[in-house]
Image (cartoon, rainbow, N blue to C red):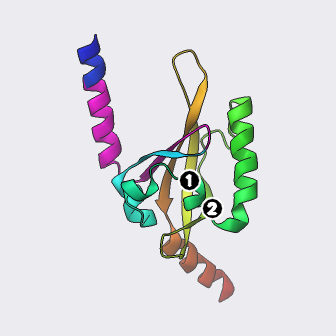
Amino acid sequence: MDDNLQAVSSLGDLIVEHTADALIYSNRDGIIERWNPAAASMFGYTFDEACGQSLDLIIPEPLRAAHWRGFDAAMSNGSTRLHGRPTLTRAAHKSGQTLYVEMSFALVSDEPGKIIGSVAMARDVTERFLREKAARQSK
């Protein structure tokens, strides 16, 4: 059985590493523990720079209080407000640039069902957002 678990774990690792969207896993305290290459590319931080850091690394300062209220509520009550549906939000790149990203969130629980963290999938939609904003303003 351990060999099968190891194979599944390795396959899971390969899937995460090759996923085109940014995948970020944080523990219950909001500390980044998983950061795939797409996240590194999108946000500008290497795995070594991001791993062990707070999610504040990519959350713009004006959004942090609301983020942590939602994060803490999800950890406490076991559900997210959007139930996995993607949402458009702002994120911060290492360079200081603001990104517009579509993100979806899910809670991760262990075998007994205890929430152990959160996983987010993110896609950079900055170019599309700015194009649509410019089109709206030109009307």
Which residue corresponds to mark 1?
103
Relative vertical location of residue 88 with respect to residue 33 in this rendering, above or below? below
Which residue lies at the image location 59% right of the left edge and 19% below the top edge? 113
Which residue corresponds to mark 2?
89
Element carrying mark 1: strand
Which residue lies at the image location 27% right of the left edge and 31% below the top edge? 10
Query: Local crowd at mark 2 within 10 Å, few (<14), some, or many (≥20)?
Result: some
Quadrant in which the N terminus appears = top left
CB within 8 Å, label 2 to label 1: yes
Quadrant in which the C terminus appears = bottom right
Task: Give coordinates of residue 27: x percent, y percent.
Answer: 55, 38
Mark identifier at residue 117: none
Relative vertical location of residue 72 with respect to residue 6 in this rendering, above or below? below
**Count of marks placed on residues:** 2
Chain part drawn in magenta: 7-29
- Check residue 14 for magenta coloring: yes
